[in-house]
Image (cartoon, grey):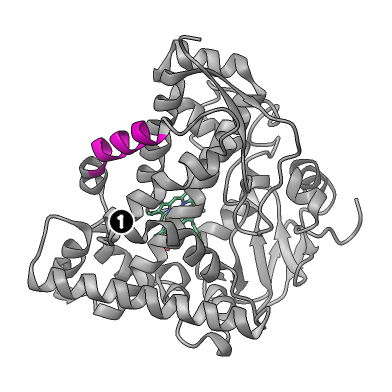
Amino acid sequence: MTNPINLMAPEVLANPYPYYAELRRLSPVCQVEPHGMWAVSRYEDVLFVLKNSALFSSSGFTVAWQPAWVGYNPMANSMITRDPPQHTRLRSLVLRAFGPATIARLESRVRATAEKLSSGLVDGADFVKTMALPVPAYVISEILGLDHQLLPYFKQWSDDIVAITPTPASPEAAERIRGTIAKLTGYVGQVIEERRREPADDTVSELLRAEVEGQRLTDVEIKDFLILLLVAGLESTTNLLGNSLLFLANHPEMMARLRAEPSLIPLFIEEMLRYDGVAPGVPRIAASDIILSGVTVPRGAMVFPLISSANRDEQKFPDPDRFDLHRGSQGGLAFGQGAHFCLGALLARMEVRIVLETVVARFQRVERTAGEISYQCALTTRGPVALPLRYIPASG
Ligand code: HEM
């Protein structure tokens, strides 16, 4: 292993797991590229970082996502970037509007959408473009109350927001990103106004109604939250679907098992989240000097708990590189832990279950086409950019 390891190097992005294993064994807490961040790779340490927001602040997100050239970035001011007690207040307010009722309301519509889209899964079709992206995009548009005609733009908007770097790639990119933020904030603002005039049985109306101990969300807080949902809910679910189908194409025996017993699909999803999760790590800032696995991480340092490494830690998961449906992993730390535990975990599980149920009912096998799979060039998300497959119909 070259030292320091670069988490963005193409060979690491293609298959990070052997590199994570080396880190766990030799340097469980060490500086890596990019940015000289402190990577934390063992399960116990990752859990400690995630659970201790007083020691490891989420405010690093704001610094990263709102450099001066951007102006106001709703995502950079949303709850994911806040520490308690501010975070606690926001979370208790949005929880009212984002619980099991939202999921129940969406389930039948997700199934109808997945079934309709599955007719586009024809020889060589890109699974990401045909199914893995449009299903979560549809769900987000329903939650945000946005016009379905805007669906094709979601990916670009989300990409623009996550692509923010301290210096813009070019003046044109800066202009486009500022434009995206203005457009998106404008659309979301319109929906808020409409629901205030005429409340409906939907998430935005519930956010407007939400009240805890006499406190309500401001319009700006609702906008920040809705835009966070677009980014947090789109790419992650798309990638989990992409990783799952790639695994099924590489393991036809697993596809046959799920076809024979679709009730195993929830177990498949939990183990997939552990085995090849879509949020490899999340950034934090050390609030003081702190010792982890015998190494002192200095105050103010950017810390990067590697969730996907924790999920392959042999101390926690025996024989961690084996995909085991009956391991009972519950996804490991894939949805985070502690104060910021993923608010969309139930929703994502529902979406992925329905898509997989649709796919295994319709096809007996999926097969890879020729060519390498390229992975997204990103630190906080992992999934194939495109996934062209052959789909062998169940009756064929
Ligand atoms: C497979 C899919 C998903 C994965 C693996 C995932 C993973 C995560 C992780 C690791 C965190 C913790 C971030 C941190 O500690 O800094 C998180 C937070 C969050 N996720 Fe997800 N997520 C997924 C899907 C979704 C969906 C579908 C939504 C909503 C539409 C969503 C909304 C959120 C929100 C709002 C937070 C912030 C919670 C807070 O700050 O309290 N996620 N997610």
| Residue 46 inside the magenta-drawn segment | no
Which residue occupies 49% across, 59% down?
A: 155
Q: Is residue 361 left or right of residue 334?
A: left
Q: Mark 1 belongs to which amino acid?
A: His
* Highlighted range, magenta: 106-117
Q: How many marks?
A: 1
Q: Position of residue 43 (x, y in %)?
A: 64, 46
Residue at 67% x, 28% y is 368
Q: Which is more toward the observer, 166 or 215?
A: 166
Q: Position of residue 72 (x, y in %)?
A: 45, 85
Rendered view: 390 above or below 106:
above
**What residue is shown with label 1?**
148
- Residue 102 is at least partly visible in this image: yes
State left or right for residue 393 relative to residue 197. Answer: right
Magenta segment: does it hold 107?
yes
| Percent position of residue 247, x then y | 62, 29
Residue furthest right in the image: 2
Q: Principal SS element in the magenta part?
A: helix
Q: Nearer the viewer, residue 71 or 306?
A: 71
